[in-house]
Image (cartoon, rainbow, N blue to C red):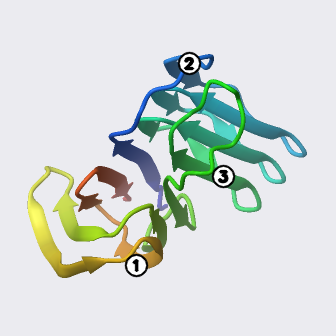
Amino acid sequence: MKIQILSISFMLTAHVLLAQDYPQQLSIGKTITAGAVSDQKAVATIVANNEVNIGAKAHYTAGLSVTMLPGFVAQAGSVFRATIAPVSSGRSATDAPGLQVRAYPNPFTDQTTIDYNLPTDGRVRHTLLNAKGQILQQVDNIDGELAGLHQTQVGGLTYRWERTCIRFRWAIKAAHLSY
């Protein structure tokens, strides 16, 4: 009998201006059901450990960080997006580009694709860590990357993947156990 336990945590951080009207911090634990659309915003941070069911849509926007804790699940067939961007007090979408990261399939075991959108040009460092935080592989992009959409592949198992840019840092953690 084979049992798999998968723990995924996303952490996105950025230095941005703060706004008002939205809460500074937001904790999300309620399941988003099929057919529902959830657009959650916070000036500083969002922490989520909820489930996004098949057919549901969730978009989380925060000025500093969006963290998906163990227990967070975006089921296949759902739409989930986490964005780091200034959250304005007027409750309208910002025209300024923000850091966006998407991983699929989510959750993953063997391999995942990380899509990311850099809002500004900059040097990027790819860092692969084991579960103990030890560096397994690190690659610096000496020439830097242009602002815009990018994609990379990351293996699962017991790795923690991290990508850093001058003003941004985000990580995906995965643990895979079987017996």
- Label 2 to label 1: alpha-carbon separation: 37 Å
Which secondary structure, mark 1? strand
Quarter occupied by residue 93: top right
Front residue of 166 and 2: 166
Expressed as whole percent of the image width and height from the top left, the position of residue 88 reads 60, 31
Q: Which residue is mark 3?
A: 80
Residue pictured at 22% horizontal, 70% vertical: 123
Expressed as whole percent of the image width and height from the top left, the position of residue 52 reads 70, 44
Mark sitting earlier along the chain (3/1): 3
- Classify the position of the C terminus by image quarter: bottom left
Tell whether 148 sits left or right of 163.
right
Up the image or down, 86 lies above or below 3; here it is above
Please rate how many residues cluster around mark 1, counting C-alpha atoms within 10 Å: few if below 14, some from 14 to 19, many from 20. Answer: few
Up the image or down, 178 lies above or below 27; here it is below
Q: Which residue is mark 1?
A: 153
Q: Amino acid at mark 1?
A: Gln
Residue pictured at 47% horizontal, 61% vertical: 2
Which secondary structure, mark 3? strand
Mark sitting earlier along the chain (2/1): 2
Q: Residue furthest left?
A: 134
Q: Amino acid at mark 2?
A: Gln
